[in-house]
Amino acid sequence: MCNHLNQQLAVWSDIDRLVQAEHNVQLDGESLTIAQLVAISGMLQSLSIFLMILISRRHRKGFELSKATKLAQRMRDSIGVVQKHMDGQNIVYGECATIKQSKHSMNTAPGANADARPTDYRKLQSSFFQHHQCGILPETAFGATATSASPMALPDDVVIASAAIRCNSLVRGHSAIRYHVVESLADLISRGITPLIPCRGSISASGDLSPLSYFGGMLEGNKGVSVRLQRSDGTQDIVPASEVLQGLGKDPISFEAKEGLSIMNGTAVSTAFAALVLQDCQDLVILSELLTAMAVEALCGKVENFHPFIGAVRPHQGQIEVADNVRDFLTGSKLTGNESIPQTGLAQDRYSIRTASQWMGPLIEDIRTAELQLKVELNSTTNNPLIDSTNARIHHGGNFQAAAATSAMEKSRTAISSEPGFEPRTSAKPLCGRARALVHL
């Protein structure tokens, strides 16, 4: 298994390369990484200590859909399957069409109204959005007098990351949505135009329905949906979506059957939050290892606390990695492992530094497991129903559930809440009168 520190060094290098590259990140539904998401979202402008130090240029990177022919074709194929089922009078959740030569409307409204049979599919898709645009924002966030984003709105980096994840999911070709609809969303976001999405409004019980509905509202030019408009001088204006589209000379999107539900019914917002938070967790783990090494030096501790033999007889991968990293950080230290330093007092170092690898090791393992979960989620189809173009089938299931992102964050939360419990004890020792005093350099 790749060492956690080396893996994160590679991630930082990838982010640096991405933000300095001339071309945008390409979304193909299969290869989106957390490094790309950080570069796209601009998270590194404000959050990560390490990224602020190591990356020379800090700005958001644009993204666009891959121009691969197979990508557009599989999206068209999924639309064809839905149309075939609808023409054949098969009941499909969330669709709507009046069947030719029939007085009956097949297919359903969403949720508890799944037994209803509406006939105007364009109106149905728009009503999906309006029904879920129920979050709360103060009046100051709307209209001509709005000059700044409300703290009750999702951070811009999360909104941008959410859009990238949703586009990446939709281009996989299992959602019956047109290529140019997804391309329009990617284009607006890359131009610095993002919907103002309330922080509260969805718990992802059935996908991130409420926050994702605001992307749909922006695309259809809903004047009730406000958007952030990023200016070249770094300032932001907040204006109705209808004005933005008009100013760009873009026609509002008129959504076809399934397309509204395809945009809304997924886990992009949950996954965006999770992926960006996870990157901070990864950085904090390495910072904790560095602080541990500093504490060992400040207390004139023993490098043997991290001897390979200790890990070899209890071979948890996380414990071994922490010990290896701390030992490497202490290479060449004049305050540890030096026979000329008096070895009076305790036979072994204080608990907080002696057990650092045993304490921190499981945390690394949890975070790495969380990372594996999110890597899968970033390149998955989170929607319902799902279109199997190869076999011309429609599958009604539950891929909109965000349990994978929730599980990843539970592990990260446990890990990161445990770190503060360990680090104060480690950092306090050099200030404690009973601890070994600092020697003179």
Image (cartoon, rainbow, N blue to C red):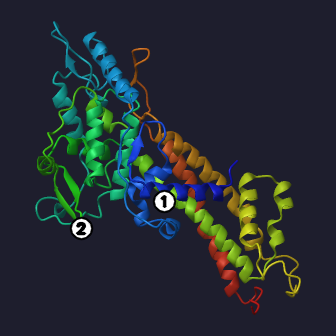
Query: Which sits in the foreground, 13 or 312?
Result: 13
Along the horizontal axis of the image, is 94 left or right of 17?
Answer: left
The quadrant in which the C terminus is found is bottom right
**Residue 41 at x, y percent in the picture:** 39, 55
- Please rate how many residues cluster around mark 1, counting C-alpha atoms within 10 Å: few if below 14, some from 14 to 19, many from 20: some
Residue 199 makes an appearance in the image = yes
The label shown at residue 16 is 1
Res 203 seen here: no
Q: Is residue 370 left or right of residue 16?
A: right
Q: Quadrant of residue 236?
A: bottom left
Residue in front for this viewpoint, 372 or 58 = 58
Position above or below: 242 against 337: above
Q: Amino acid at mark 2?
A: Asp
Q: Residue furthest bottom?
A: 440
User: Horizontally, is 31 left or right of 337 in the view?
Assistant: left
Q: Nearer the viewer, residue 16 or 48?
A: 16
Residue 318 quadrant: bottom right
Depth check, front residue: 134 or 68: 68
The answer to whether the residues at label 2 and label 1 have Cβ atoms under 8 Å apart is no
Q: Which mark is residue 80?
A: none
Residue 62 placement (x, y as % from top left): 35, 51
Please report the residue visible at 68 percent of the width from the left and 77 percent of the height from the top: 294
Q: Amino acid at mark 1?
A: Asp
Real-space CA distance between mark 2 and mark 1, rounded to the nearest whole angstrom = 23 Å
Q: Outermost residue toward the top?
A: 101
Label 1 residue SS: helix
Residue 123 placed where, x, y %?
Answer: 16, 30
**At x 79% / y 66%, what residue is drawn?**
306
Q: Residue pushed farthest front?
A: 22
Residue underneath mark 2:
233
Which residue: 76% across, 78% down?
333
